[in-house]
Amino acid sequence: MDWSRIKSIFILTFFILNVYLAYQFFNVRDAAKYEYIKEASFEEKLKNDDIQYKDLPKEQEKTQYISVKPKQFLESELPEREGELQTLRNGGTLLEVIFENPIKLPSKFDPTQFSAYIKQNIENGDQYTFWEKNDVNRTITFYQQSEGRTFYQNIYGKLIFTFNEDGGIVSYQQTFLEVNEQLGEKQELLSALRAIETLYNRGLLEPKSEITKIELGYATIVQLSASQQVLAPTWRFVINGEENLYVHAFEGQVIQFGEEI
């Protein structure tokens, strides 16, 4: 057996392997360096346009799409409360309650205090989060959430109160979504900064604007039927404390709501 030849083959093999590993290492390093430069470059664009934002969420865990369906309220399950007229509409998916005596709101509205009232007096009240108070329409709106993530603009996961000119709550309407299952494999989330870049490239961020709130929730992307929806993780950005912009947290496209789904 020619040991000298075998030794030469081993040396050549290890040399080629080392060259390949070195090539892979420098490729990965250069790619990471390019990504860093690209990110720094985008942040520089935001700075030049005086677009400001608060601390970015560090959402790194993988997550999934979810399937939901509207809850059907049953009269037999509704708690009997004195001074309330309860009516089921839309095949039992909408509960409407009218108060015989309006519930007086404090002169200074406090969403936290009102949320505490909801948790104590509304079925599944702890699963809704405050959205807005509209003094023109005289409404107070809450949207449903799951594990701290809001179901954006979803008419089937909503709690809306109506108040009179004296500031008294006269009625509310409630819908509720039941989570069926999680769909597909868990996926990495698009970072909040990359989602902001999507908005910037689409011309949706004006110079001198401020992103005053960033959060992760869910938006409906597929209405399978009247009784089933598919929701996707979605970044929500509040611009200047007023405008809401949404970006699909998996695929990166801007989500636009025409009407509530």
Image (cartoon, rainbow, N blue to C red):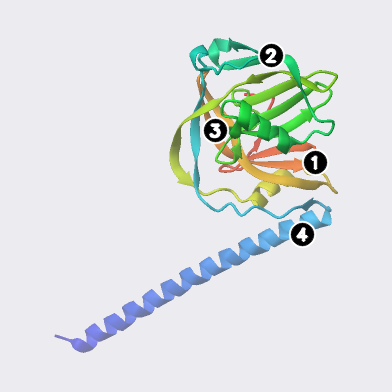
The answer to which image quadrant residue 112 occupies is top right
Q: Which amino acid does label 1 sit on?
A: Gly
Q: Where is residue 84 in the image (x, y as percent from the top left)?
A: 65, 14
Q: Where is residue 184 in the image (x, y as percent from the top left)?
A: 43, 39
Q: Is residue 103 visible?
A: yes
> Which residue in the protein does label 2 denote?
98
**Residue 231: which numbered mark, if any?**
3
Q: Nearer the viewer, mark 4 or mark 2?
A: 2
> Helix, strand or loop at disc 3?
strand
Which quadrant is the C terminus positioned in? Answer: top right
> Helix, strand or loop at disc 4?
helix
> Which residue in the protein does label 4 denote?
44
Q: Where is residue 62 in the image (x, y as percent from the top left)?
A: 50, 49
Q: What residue type is labelled 4?
A: Glu
Viewer-nearest residue: 93 or 107: 107
Residue at 67% over, 60% down: 38
Viewer-nearest residue: 15 or 61: 61
> Helix, strand or loop at disc 2?
strand
